[in-house]
Amino acid sequence: MDKIGFKPVPAAIATALALLIWFVIPVPDGVTPQAWHLLAMFVGVIAAIIGKAMPIGALSVVAIMLVALTGVTAEKPSDAMKDALSSFSSPLIWLIGVAIMISRGILKTGLGARIGYLFIAVWGKKTLGIGYSLAISELLLAPVTPSNTARGGGIIHPVMKAIAGSYDSDPEKNTQNRMGKYLALVNYHGNPITSAMFITATAPNPLVVDIVAKATGSDIQLSWGTWALAMLLPGLVAMFIMPLVLYFMYPPEIKETPNAAQFAKENLAKMGAMNRGEKIMLAIFALLLTLWAGIPAMLFGKAFAVDATTTAFIGLSLLLLSGVLTWDDILKEKSAWDTITWFAALVMMATFLNKLGLIGWFSGVLESGIGRLGLGWMGASALLLLAYLYAHYMFASTTAHITAMFAAFYAAGVALGAPPMLFALLMAAASSLMMTLTHYATGTSPVIFGSGYTTLAEWWKAGFVMSVINILVFVLVGGIWWKILGYW
């Protein structure tokens, strides 16, 4: 007999939580029964995601079915089904899905590995230089790799392991302290910083854009260019500091690595000259960045502006037309289709929680609770920001965390007097920086932690230290930078 399609214990806990909210806890004053019932389903789904009761895509199908069946958003069954499927038309969701498909080209052509080896060939004479080479490679790939797992775990990590292995730094031989431990931590901690720097650098970022736009009545609509410019300076400062901090915390035994540059050059020689696919991928990469940054509109006027999702479809179309990617490649890109499915379900539930007034009610509860402390807007928003960031110890998914907490915390901060754009950018940064904390914080962490270069205690210690440094950089450097840009 085949196994059942879910894990019984986490599924039972998630169901119990949903039933408890629906049937046992009375509906609070100021909340409609429909909003409360949708919250019950939402909490159940988030609990099931945290407990890994089913794959997130499968859970999302169940969530869509429940919203349509219960009719919490509309009385008429056909309208309820339309509501349940409504987010599949969201351009933000397709932006990320299509960008993941495009990133397949970076892996397939070998362009990602080439970029990593090129930097190591130039700066790889010291272990610290290799660390910076990995960080810069991560940064260059980030704008067109929305799967931070594919970027940090699939592209950079094999390069990092090859370099460490060339110096016989191998956890199985108990020689990880030679350099592997340091490089693995740099490999990982570059990932959350670059994820914070571009809307297209990690899948949940468009969710942040969507929530901020809805919370401010579309007063703040973070474009790709606005986000990239805002995060540029604090991101670069954080990226510069990170390899140094980890070098100080876990100094590698081998500090001089003249062979690493040679090793990288040998690998580049094996790869040979750039092939046709790599050249086309590089050209499309440049075109995507140009259009996402809004350069045609800046040079020639608004008539030449291209929507961010349209840009992604242009890139994918060119890859298909040129034959760099085939339709089979796209069909096999499971993570893209998976992301589109779970993203649509979670955005739909979050949207209707907002429409039915529950987010407004919950942010009001937060606001009154923190308001009584008399902290002023700076203290109140700092408390909300830190509570939001460190709540990630309880989450194994940034998407689940953002969907569950971002809207209410953001609305409460703004209601308590925080400048809306400043607080939006800080919360957006925290939504990626929280990935530093644990070995289950995001998809990249189990890949790199699973390679065995660090102990659990070392990973958590590095994660906490980097979270403090990163958030300080984004608050201080970011705050000043955004003031100069006139964002608050």
Image (spheres, grey):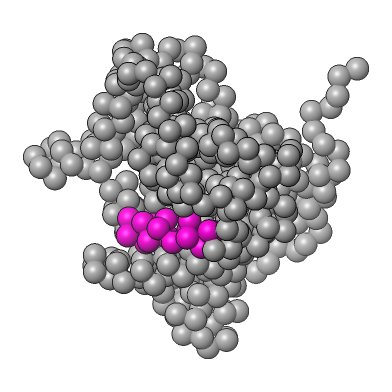
Left/right placement of residue 163 relative to residue 274 reads: right
- Nearest the eye: 4 or 253: 253
443 drawn magenta: no
Task: Say how many tags the image has.
Answer: 0
- In this picture, which residue range is highlighted in magenta? 231-247
- Which quarter of the rendering shows the C terminus? bottom left
Give the residue displayed 71% in from the left and 48% down from the top. Answer: 50
On screen, residue 308 versus residue 146, left or right, reads left
Q: Nearer the viewer, residue 408 or 336?
A: 336
- Residue at 57% from the left image edge and 86% from the top image edge: 372
Q: Main secondary structure of the magenta part?
A: helix
User: Horizontal and vertical percent for residue 331?
Assistant: 52, 17
Residue 228 vs 238, above or below: the answer is: above
Residue 79 can be seen in this image: no
Q: Which residue lies at the image location 51% right of the left edge and 52% below the top edge?
A: 255
Q: Is residue 132 something that shows in the picture?
A: yes
Q: Is residue 164 above or below residue 463?
A: above
In percent of width and height, residue 360 lies at: 52, 64
Q: Nearer the viewer, residue 129 or 484?
A: 129
**Residue 110: x percent and y percent?**
43, 23
Image x and y of residue 353, in percent: 56, 53
The quarter of the displayed image where residue 363 is located: bottom right
**Residue 239 lies in the magenta-colored region:** yes
